[in-house]
Amino acid sequence: MMNILVDTNVIITYRTERDDKYKESSIQVMKMCADKIIEGYVAFHSMSIIWYSSGRMKQPEEIRREWLDRVCKVLTTASAKHEAVVEAVHNTEFRDFEDNLQDICAQSINADYIVTVNTKDYEHSKVKAVTPIELVQIVNA
């Protein structure tokens, strides 16, 4: 079975009501994970980002906790060893430290892909980054 790490931005796109070109494909990715067509993971640190984003949308704590619970039922959390995080701290190839952590978590679960709406941010990633649209095409091929 294919392993993927779902970037925070895909989960937020899936969750919000905003009009986004990745909205439908993000929904499809989450559904494929829920249906166990692919094995989906979320980086441990992404959970706090999702929590924070939900707060900025002025959602009550109960709804925010319910949402995180749903994410945990569909995606398994992935983490990284201390040494890998320290390596990320010193890795200057990534412009965004958080994206570097996503890559490290993807490596820890032997992910086939990181699914993200910002593939350009992963040019130095050891795990190939694809958009939700690309992943849907790969799975359906």
Image (tube, grey):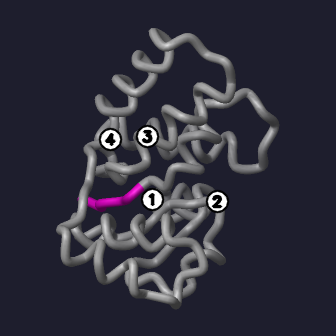
Quarter of the image holding residue 104? bottom left
Mark 2 and mark 1 lie on one chain; the one further toward the N terminus is 2
| x and y, in percent, of residue 25 in the image | 62, 47
Horizontal relation, residue 140 to residue 127: left or right: right
Q: CA distance from mark 3 to mark 4?
A: 15 Å
Inspect the image, locate mark 4, and give the three-letter code of the amino acid beneath it. Leu
Mark 2 and mark 4 lie on one chain; the one further toward the N terminus is 4
In the rendered view, tell whether residue 106 sits above or below residue 7: below
Q: CA distance from mark 2 to mark 1?
A: 17 Å
Marks 3 and 4: which is nearer the front? 3
Counting other residues with Cα less than 10 Å from the Cα at mark 4, is it few (<14), some (14-19), or many (20 or more)?
Answer: many
| x and y, in percent, of residue 21 in the image | 77, 49
Counting other residues with Cα less than 10 Å from the Cα at mark 2, is it few (<14), some (14-19), or many (20 or more)?
Answer: many
Mark 2 and mark 3 lie on one chain; the one further toward the N terminus is 3
Inspect the image, locate mark 2, and give the three-letter code of the amino acid beneath it. Val
- Give the labeled residue for mark 4: 75
| x and y, in percent, of residue 114 in the image | 45, 65
Residue 79 located within the stretch drawn in magenta: no
- Give the labeled residue for mark 2: 117
> What element does badge 3 sit on?
helix
Image quadrant for the N terminus? bottom left
**For residue 30, which numbered disc appears in the image?**
none
**For residue 139, which numbered disc appears in the image?**
1
In the rendered view, tell whether residue 128 sits above or below residue 7: below
Marks 4 and 1: which is nearer the front? 4
Mark 3 and mark 4 lie on one chain; the one further toward the N terminus is 3
